Image (cartoon, grey):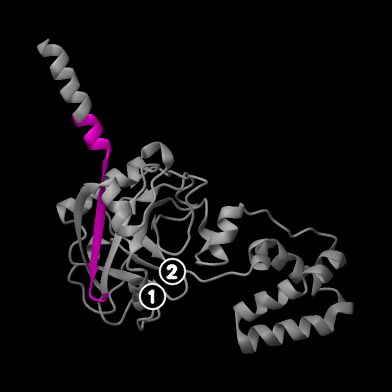
Amino acid sequence: MKKVIYLVILVVLASCATDKDYIVTIHTTHGDMKAVLFDETPKHKENFIKLAKEGYFDSTLFHRVIKDFMIQGGDPNSKGTEPGARLGNGGPGYTVPAEFNKDLFHVKGALSAARQGDQVNPKKESSGSQFYIVQGKVWSEEELTVDMNKLGRAGQQMMQKPKNDSIKNMLINIYQTEGPNAYGKKLVELKDFIEEDMQVDVDKEIPQERLDAYTTIGGAPHLDDEYTVFGKVVEGLDVIDKIAAVETDRTDRPKENVVVTMEVEELPKKKITKLYGYEYPAEEK
């Protein structure tokens, strides 16, 4: 009888444990953000929670900030550094295996793992501590359903034809006077002409869920399936905008330090849903 009671207690305790989750509060000099980490990326979740609980991130900086793209932090070398010091190479001395998931992508507020480039990191393993939070921008459907790399290459080849000199001169002028974004938009406008002239197809497919998110909330779709998304900001999206708007130097480091501390709180999942509107997958409820 005692064994039965003991087993029942264990089952109840295990059930209670699975009914809870963590809220990570990222305190910054521009306000607080609260984030949930995904069970679908267990290695990243466990590592990030462990470091946050240990105070590893406390007094670090958001050391790399690019407006309409992302804010990056987690470099332990950023603690107490002088203004202008080069950052971005620090970490705990290990990497985390990539955990890509088709349902997790770089919508605004996505918490993702930084990593070294493919040349030295072909397995796309994540930094042990460096992370970024996506700001991104809102995209048009046309921008998302066109392979811009392929269109760019076809455009370059199209401009080599003497008959297209007038288009070439127009595109060069746009690039020089208005910048690469305007140049890219003009290429999209010329898509049908370029496809016909070069006999190529530059269309690409994008899952409907991603298309809907990027055309409404915004994000950074070019990072999808290349960097592990392991969490989501559920409160404080405006803080991302505030940090992304700060003045930076030529290395994208804020001229005034954006200091970070973190705390971890364990709460019932139902309470997290009630407080922050985060809906867990049906099987977790």
Asked whether 251 falls inside the magenta stretch, the response is no
Labels 1 and 2 touching (C-beta < 8 A): yes
Highlighted magenta segment, given as a residue range: 13-30
State how many labels appear.
2
158 or 43, which lies in front? Answer: 43
Residue tagged 2: 135
| Residue occupying image coordinates x 70% and y 68% | 152
Mark 2 lies on a secondary structure that is loop
Looking at the rendering, in which quadrant would you find the N terminus?
Answer: top left
Disc 1 and disc 2: Cα gap in Å?
7 Å
In the rendered image, is residue 93 in sight?
no
- Going from N to C along the chain, the mark reached first, 1 or 2, is 2
Q: Is residue 123 above or below residue 89?
A: above
Residue type, mark 1 in image: Asp
Q: Locate residue 23, reporting x and y percent.
A: 26, 54
Residue tagged 1: 241
Q: Is residue 143 above or below residue 82?
A: above
